[in-house]
Image (spheres, helix red, strand yellow):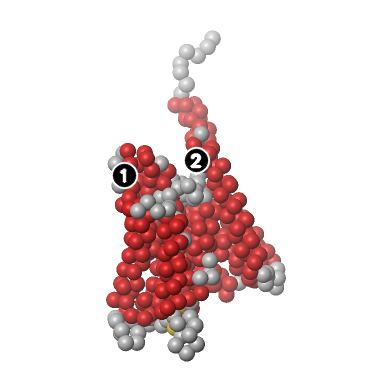
Amino acid sequence: MSNSAGPTNAELAALRRPAAGNATWRALRNYQAINIVVLVTLFLGFCTIYSLLYPEQLRFASLGNLSVLSQQVPVTAIAAIGVGLLMIGGEFDISVAGTFTLVPFIVAITSAGSWGWPLWLALLAGLATALLLGLMNGMITTRLGIPSFIATLGTMFFLRGVIRFVSINPTTKQPDNIAFFPGDTLKALLGGQIAGPIYAQIVWLLAVAGVGYLLLNRHRFGNHLLLTGGNRDAAIAVGVPVRNVKVTAFMLCAATAALAGLLQAVRINQIEPSYATISGLELKAIAAVVVGGTSLFGGRGAILGIVLGAVLIEAVDNILVLISAPETIFKGFLGATTILAVILNTVIGRRARR
């Protein structure tokens, strides 16, 4: 004789559990940054274990090397966050290395010598310069309809010329490094040691990443940015101020480049003109963004992925330095990784659209 009563609440809950578990797994598998999360975890885990087992061969996990990484990774990651937000909006900025270098120059020049401005005023002047550069790039791109790659390429060469001019040594007639000693307070604030291998740059990275996450995932600006980059016509149709969104993204990109430049200058106590010319910072930032899962075509990206992309690139660079590998190997790795990341992101994007 069959039981005519329906399933009990316990039975219904048991039936729902697998579905909920499958949904969680699907959400995790479809997370934009899941590939880079897995890759970075495996890579850092392997390097750390190998370093602990064979410290004479690889000093990756040593306190000294971890201190270097905790100061260098945030510089690249903070610059990459601004580049990533702009790329999510469908635009590029390859002039970030110029902003990265020029802003500390402005702070150093205006706060010393005949200028003698208070440090806070010099910092405001540097930040204002960065925002004006971002505004200029944004206006040229959105108002004149010039592709951002071309607009920022012109800005890049312009900034290189300006930096070369302000860094000329009167004796040698060649660009020279400029000493940068902003005082103990700013030194501690931007680059002071907190505990062991943990430095203030890590705190700044967490702060910038937190703000970036809130803007992208918890604010209307993020929704507008994703829609603008993913489908500009649809964004215009629903009333998104596309031009304003893109200009704001350009200004955020310049601001993060300025902060990264100040962190670097404070760390090494000098400003190097070469960062604007041969450092390849802009390409490294773009590579970190792409490796982190951000689409080159806009409309897709995650702050966590961008940060982990920078971690992976700097960690590989660090490993190659530790094993005394030629610099060209890192450049080859950077190029190959970027190409593979673009292919992977394109495939993932097509599957997501299906």
Label 2 sits on a secondary structure element that is helix
Q: Give the tally of numbered discs.
A: 2
Side (left or right) of 263 relative to 124: right
Q: Residue at x 34, y 72 (%)?
A: 126
Q: Residue at x 33, y 41 (%)?
A: 236
Residue on which the image places disc 1: 240
Is 7 rendered above or below residue 44?
Answer: above
At label 2, which amino acid type do we have?
Answer: Ala
Depth check, front residue: 16 or 61: 61
Side (left or right) of 251 relative to 289: left
Side (left or right) of 231 relative to 293: left
Q: Residue at x 52, y 50 (%)?
A: 293
Residue on which the image places disc 2: 27
Which dot, 2 or 1, sits closer to the camera? Answer: 1
Residue 41, given in percent of the width and then of the height, sits at 58, 55
Q: Residue at x 39, y 56 (%)?
A: 212
First along the sequence among labels 2 and 1: 2
Residue placed furthest toward the top: 1
Residue 197, which numbered label? none
Residue 313, given in percent of the width and then of the height, sits at 57, 61
Side (left or right) of 322 relative to 196: right
Residue 169, given in percent of the width and then of the height, sits at 46, 85
Is 145 rendered above or below residue 163?
Answer: above
